Amino acid sequence: MNDFVNASDAPNFDTDGIVRGARRKRATAIAGIAAALIVAGGGTALATAVGGGSDTTPKPAAAATVTTDDAATILVSGSGSTYKLDFAGISLDFAKQGLLKSQLELGTVSEVPCGKNGKPGTVIAVDPHSPKTVTKGDTVNLTVCTD
């Protein structure tokens, strides 16, 4: 031990290289995990988590839950599956966006006084509604609540 007391050679560490290597390994691991999720079908969950998920447009429901007979619900059929869009209580603008995303055409928009049954400016009924099924390109008529 006493032989090294006055030695001028101190250990030399490449700290910048060590940090770069750790960052490179971490970035490679994150990219690998993201690729594995996308390949395994978790791409939608990953996109939702990254996107924030604050979108209030109608979302397709699972095909097993398509059993309701609601006046503001549409059953959309395409590619061998059927999903439900519920427009009850959403604004006309969001309803138009939901129809556009589902590749459906907007027909007539009728206004009816709703009184205590709904909030003014929101959709209270659609035509055709469930249990009738529509396909891409079909026209959907909306009924909006007015004060």
Image (spheres, helix red, strand yellow):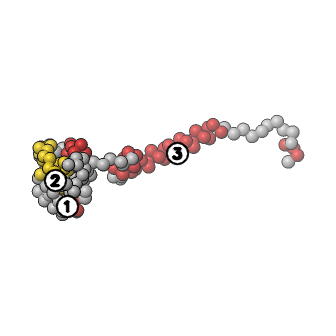
User: Circle 1 sits on which residue?
Assistant: 66
Coordinates of residue 40 in the picture (x, y in percent) = 35, 53
Q: Quadrant of residue 10?
A: top right
Q: Is residue 1 visible?
A: yes
Which one is nearer the viewer's eye here, 102 or 33?
Answer: 102
Coordinates of residue 128 in the picture (x, y in percent) = 11, 53
- For the residues carrying marks 1 and 2, which lies nearer the camera in this image? 2
Q: Residues within 10 Å of mark 1 (few under 14, many from 20)?
A: some
Identify the element where label 3 is drawn: helix
Q: In the drawing, what numbered circle is on residue 136?
A: none
Say left or right for 33 vs 96: right
**Distance of label 1 from label 3 (alpha carbons):** 44 Å
Which one is nearer the viewer's eye here, 51 or 86?
Answer: 86
Residue type highlighted by circle 3: Arg
- For the residues carrying marks 3 and 2, which lies nearer the camera in this image? 2
User: Circle 2 sits on which residue?
Assistant: 125
Residue type highlighted by circle 2: Ala
Task: Give the residue drawn at x 15%, y 57%.
Answer: 71
